[in-house]
């Protein structure tokens, strides 16, 4: 199955802390009849130049704050920031306000094949950054150039701590917690990125095509990270919207990548099982 995806920004973002749990949260909300309502817990993600974003489901790795979005550390009392009046949100003392069942962390590894028909273009200004000089078009442009095919595998990473939902002091990992199963994973994951001139602006229009066959595919997006790297986000969900897989494959192929450009894909991921279907 081949499908091209589109994505949009969440209508509202807010931060909310759970009682006694020292975990950063970002929560997506929507305006209901009685005010702001929590949709599902999300981790922060960066925005690209067009202002689009695809939020991740509950990141557990130590670098959660890398994206620089709204984070809050849980205190002994319930706190919140963002949309909503005092008293909105989960009830005070609710040990599981987001109705989580279990979670698991993952790692990704694979390779990127740059497009042969649309490779990284030359820099029209050259290294000196000035037009009309001898070095014009002698080097490739820097930054993220994700155009091509991304293919990677995912494995469960038991070395990363997961959220303690039951309050017993131990993380509740899917497959280890009674009544849960380890996340089901595809043999591999693949998508293609294309860029064409945007007829409605002076920029480029980026499209994403899922190359797999899973009916659980939800969305995919690539944003530019620091140092010229490309940060991918690929998300899947179960038919009942209770299970969510999020993968974060990353590449760095420009000349300014450190220690050196590489077509290897590395990254993280996570799986979250909820007790209730999660709106999206």
Image: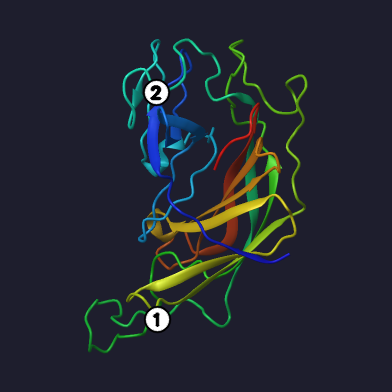
Nearer to me, 221 or 113: 221
CA neighbours of label 2 inside 10 A, class few (<14), some (14 to 19), many (20+): some
Whether residue 60 sits left or right of residue 225 in the image: it is right
Per the model, the C-alpha gap separating discs 1 and 2 is 45 Å
What residue is at 75 percent from the left and 59 percent from the top?
Answer: 213
* On screen, residue 40 above or below 50: above
Please state, as top left, top right, bottom left or bottom right, where the C terminus lies in the image.
top right
SS label for mark 1: loop
Left or right of residue 247: residue 15: left
Number of numbered callouts drawn: 2
* Residue 258 visible from this viewpoint: no
The quarter of the displayed image where residue 262 is located: bottom right
Q: Is 78 located above or below residue 31 in the figure?
A: above
Observer-side mark, 1 or 2, equals: 2
> Which residue is situated farthest in the front direction here?
33
- Point 28% across, 81% down: residue: 125
Q: Which residue is mark 1?
A: 122
Position of the N terminus, as image quadrant, is: bottom right
Element on which disc 2 rests: loop
Name the residue at 32% across, 83% down: 124
Q: Which mark is residue 177?
A: none
Q: Taking 183 as reference, is 250 above or below it?
A: below
Residue, disc 2: 73
Q: Which comes sooner in the sequence, label 1 or label 2?
A: 2
> Is residue 194 in view?
yes
Q: Nearer the viewer, residue 277 or 163?
A: 277
Q: Is residue 164 left or right of residue 189?
A: left
Above or below: residue 105 compared with residue 171: below
Residue 278: image x %, image y %? Answer: 59, 36
Q: Nearer the viewer, residue 220 or 98?
A: 98
Q: Position of residue 88 (x, y in %)?
A: 39, 22
């Amino acid at each position: 199955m081949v499908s091209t995806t589109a994505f949009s920004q969440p209508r509202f973002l807010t931060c909310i802390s759970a009682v006694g749990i020292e975990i950063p949260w970002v929560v997506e909300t929507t305006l209901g009849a009685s005010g702001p309502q929590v949709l599902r817990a999300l981790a922060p993600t960066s925005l690209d130049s067009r202002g689009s974003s695809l939020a991740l489901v509950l990141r557990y790795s130590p670098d959660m704050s890398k994206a620089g979005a709204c984070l809050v550390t849980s205190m002994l009392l319930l706190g919140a920031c963002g949309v909503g009046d005092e008293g909105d949100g989960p009830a005070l003392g609710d040990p599981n306000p987001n109705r989580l069942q279990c979670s698991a962390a993952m790692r990704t590894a694979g390779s990127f094949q740059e497009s042969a028909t649309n490779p990284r273009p030359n820099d029209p200004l050259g290294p000196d950054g000035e037009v009309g000089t001898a070095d014009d078009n002698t080097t490739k442009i820097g930054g993220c150039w994700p155009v091509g095919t991304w293919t990677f595998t995912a494995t469960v990473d038991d070395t990363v701590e997961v959220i303690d939902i039951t309050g017993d002091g131990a993380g509740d990992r899917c497959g280890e917690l009674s009544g849960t199963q380890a996340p089901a994973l595809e043999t591999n994951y693949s998508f293609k990125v294309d860029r064409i001139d945007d007829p409605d602006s002076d920029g480029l229009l980026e499209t994403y095509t899922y190359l797999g066959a899973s009916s659980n595919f939800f969305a995919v997006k690539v944003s530019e990270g620091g140092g010229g790297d490309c940060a991918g986000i690929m998300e899947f969900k179960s038919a009942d919207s209770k299970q969510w897989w999020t993968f974060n494959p990353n590449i760095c192929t420009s000349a300014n990548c450190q220690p050196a450009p590489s077509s290897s894909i590395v990254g993280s991921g996570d799986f979250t099982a909820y007790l209730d279907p999660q709106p999206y």
